[in-house]
Amino acid sequence: MLHGAVNMSNYGDYIFAELFYQSLLNNGVQVEFYTHPKYGISSYFQKHLDYKPETRNYKKLLHQCDAFIFFSGGYIAEPRKKGFLAETRHIHRYLYPASLFMKAGKPIYVMGVGAGPFDENAAFSKRAREILNYATVITVRNEESLQYCKEFGINNDIQVTADTALVIKEFLDREKQDVPRFETENGKKMLLFHIDSNAEVTAKLKEIVVPATIRFLKAHPDYQLYLAADGIKRDSHYQEYETIFAGCDPITLKYDDPWKLTRQIERADLIITTKLHVGIVGSALGRSVVSFPFVPNKTLRFYKQIGEADRCVPLKEITTEKAYQMLEAYKDRMVTVPQELIDKAKLNLELLPKE
């Protein structure tokens, strides 16, 4: 059984799901996803994975499956919003099925996750500690996650790898040759601006990052602005950003297929993002990325890990002048992810069970 953050349409989580799903199929393993109606695999994931559950009865699947794989899209950390209901939802979304496998004495694989910070008094953290100390295999995507686990009493063997999405180039070249490469209009350079549906994030971007972007575009008319999202959004979300950038003649790329977005990222000359995995994929594909995360913890860890910490400044700390300086500084400086980290990312897939 595979499980992670599979119940929506998020781009990064989908990429993880396909990487792990295809790797297991290639290993000769029969694969089922967790099918809980609220927290299990979404219709969006099923469509793009061409996956049809054996049964909608997730309790039957839990009984039938021999092992549980909790893959990279799940984040073993505290909910952002504290409280009983947030804790309960977080446990049911991520840890409940793993707990059942643990009670049944079946193996659990925790692969390529971020971990921590933990809260000694929180129900989610306590349940996570039980599962991590039971797991057959654990890999975490950075040293900070390992340190959090050690400090929280995780005595199990843990390997430090890297984010699984760093293997995207090889997978794209090998498995997605039928997805056409993206071409820009008029041969201009491509500035890919990652839009967000969160009202607070949008307000911050509008106040701070958008003015810097408009100034940059005026100074560099060889760039064309493209607007893209990393999940299914309402038309109103796209329209809001089209209005914000009305004087820049933006081209809107509506998200409907994760591999089309990957090709768009692959073509981008400069990427502005508030999210983790648009930045990770852009970095893995050798593009230039500047990151202004709204929830900075795991994003800061990634850019530090690849030796590009200066490309990432939390959205709540950035100024318009600093954002503009970053765009100028990185406009012609593509990211090169160390091969050592890409090899470590491959371990998250190589350590999966085989037939």
Image: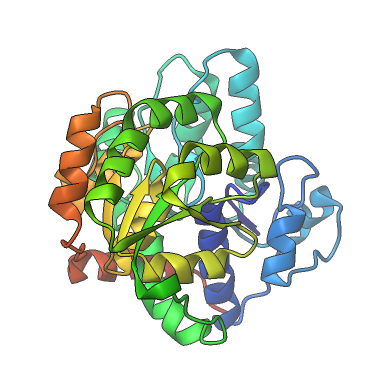
Q: In this view, does 233 lie above or below 251?
A: above
Q: How is the image coloured?
A: rainbow
What residue appears at the point 86 percent right and 60 percent down from the top-left corner?
Answer: 55
Residue 109 visible to the viewer: no
What residue appears at the point 62 percent right and 65 percent down from the top-left corner?
Answer: 257
Q: How many marks do you count on the picture? A: 0
Q: In this view, does 349 lie above or below 317?
A: below
Q: In which quarter of the image is residue 90?
A: top right
Of residues 333 and 128, the one drawn nearer to the viewer in this rendering: 333
Q: Residue 107: where, in percent of width, then height?
A: 55, 56
Q: Residue 70: where, in percent of width, then height?
A: 54, 52
Q: Residue 163: where, in percent of width, then height?
A: 35, 56
What residue appears at the point 17 percent right and 66 percent down from the top-left corner?
Answer: 338
Q: Residue 253: where, in percent of width, then height?
A: 55, 59
Quadrant into which the N terminus falls? bottom right
Of residues 38 and 253, the one drawn nearer to the viewer in this rendering: 253
**In the shown orientation, is residue 325 left or right of residue 351?**
left
Q: Is residue 255 above or below residue 146?
A: below
**In the shown orientation, is residue 28 left or right of residue 200?**
right
**In the shown orientation, is residue 52 left or right of residue 242?**
right
What residue appears at the point 68 percent right and 44 percent down from the top-left corner?
Answer: 235
